[in-house]
Image (cartoon, rainbow, N blue to C red):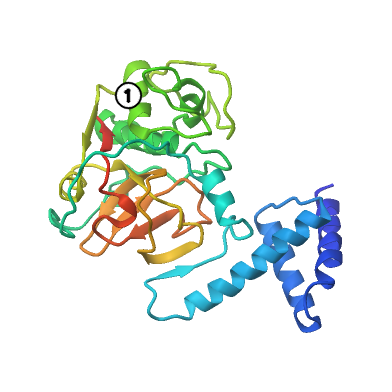
């Protein structure tokens, strides 16, 4: 059945694309897009939708080639699961940080508090990259990444520990936490929930990428509290002691593949996990799988890139 679906998709793609592209482009691009669909498990049954997605993909590839040929760029674009999405779809389906009134934090000199290069991945306390899917649950993934690292670093838990983001999506929404499942939330408030109720494992409460009813409110993995810092200087000092969750504007991250990214806005809409810093970049663990970015990570230019220093950055204690 799976092979039949792929054959049908290829036939549909051929019918939709042949009439659109010049003869010299038809075969090569058809093969490229159908290969892309297979790689990223795209299942498109409607010919009109297929035609639309293929057109978006073609435009994206052309943009990528032009961008990557520009030697003045500090980062490269690449092919990933978002390459046939519009920018609006990407923001709506892949981010998930709720807006708040930002505190008044003054602009700071780049690397004002830098204390030396650090990469917490080298210590074994950073758990593997996960994928939030088409659910605005980044806040649950950032807080869970922080909690997993805390359990390894301070509670002697195994490096294979995998805790449940779905539990937070389903359960951490009542006051005073006020998260909104797949429609957004806050890593800091999720960590407060973990402090109050604990967190269970992904094996006992697996991720579904949808907002469901709360099945298990408590868990055996707990913390004592939540601490936060704000501003580039404090973050640069704190990252020497531990990784921490941060808020960013990821509106322009759709096409990132490698390098040091600096094409940012500053309207915070995404929670991620800061795992390292040097004098030339922040190292960020994201939650979009390993096919995005540098095997799931992104390097940001130092300083307030993507608004990383604009709001409080939490970690469990």
Secondary structure of the residue carrying tag 1 is helix
Q: Nearer the viewer, residue 154 or 180?
A: 180
Task: Give the quarter of the figure containing the C terminus.
Answer: top left
Q: Position of residue 61 (x, y in %)?
A: 60, 71
Q: Where is residue 194 in the image (x, y as percent from the top left)?
A: 36, 23
Q: Is 119 drawn above or below residue 135 in the view shown?
A: below
Q: Is 105 drawn above or below residue 98 in the view shown?
A: below
Q: Is residue 312 left or right of residue 234?
A: right
Report the residue at 43% width, 39% height from top: 97
Q: Is 305 drawn above or below residue 106 in the view shown?
A: below
Report the residue at 64% width, 59% height from top: 84
Snapshot quadrant of residue 147: top left
For label 1, count other residues whose C-alpha is less than 10 Å away and answer few (under 14), some (14-19) or many (20+).
many
Which residue in the structure is indicated by mark 1?
192
Q: Is residue 290 left or right of residue 15?
A: left
Snapshot quadrant of residue 49: bottom right
Report the residue at 23% width, 57% height from top: 303
Q: Position of residue 174 (x, y in %)?
A: 44, 17
């Amino acid at each position: 059945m799976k092979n039949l679906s792929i054959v049908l998709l290829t036939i549909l793609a051929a019918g939709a694309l042949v009439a659109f592209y010049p003869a010299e482009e038809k075969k090569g691009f058809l093969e490229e897009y159908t290969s892309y669909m297979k790689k990223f498990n795209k299942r498109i049954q409607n010919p009109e939708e297929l035609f639309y997605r293929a057109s978006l993909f073609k435009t994206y590839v052309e943009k990528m080639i032009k961008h990557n040929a520009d030697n003045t760029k500090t980062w490269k674009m690449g092919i990933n699961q978002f390459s046939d999405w519009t920018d609006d779809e990407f923001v709506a389906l892949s981010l998930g940080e709720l807006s708040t009134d930002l505190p008044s934090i003054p602009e700071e000199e780049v690397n004002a508090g830098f204390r030396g290069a650090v990469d917490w991945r080298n210590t074994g306390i950073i758990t593997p990259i996960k994928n939030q899917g088409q659910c605005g649950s980044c806040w649950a993934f950032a807080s869970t990444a922080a909690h997993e690292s805390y359990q390894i670093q301070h509670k002697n838990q195994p490096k294979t520990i995998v805790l449940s983001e779905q539990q937070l999506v389903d359960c951490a929404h009542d006051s005073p936490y006020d998260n909104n499942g797949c429609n957004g939330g806050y890593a800091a408030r999720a960590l407060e929930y973990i402090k109050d109720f604990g967190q269970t494992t992904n094996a006992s409460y697996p991720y579904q990428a949808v907002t469901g009813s709360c099945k298990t409110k408590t868990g055996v993995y707990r913390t004592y509290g939540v601490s936060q810092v704000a501003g580039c200087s404090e973050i640069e000092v704190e990252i020497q002691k531990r990784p921490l969750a941060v808020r960013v504007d990821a509106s322009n991250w759709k096409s990132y593949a490698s390098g040091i990214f600096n094409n940012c806005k500053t309207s915070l809409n995404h929670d991620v996990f800061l795992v390292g810093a040097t004098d030339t970049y922040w190292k960020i663990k994201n939650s979009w799988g390993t096919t995005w970015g540098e095997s799931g990570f992104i390097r940001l230019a130092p300083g307030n890139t993507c608004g990383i220093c604009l709001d409080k950055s939490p970690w469990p204690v």
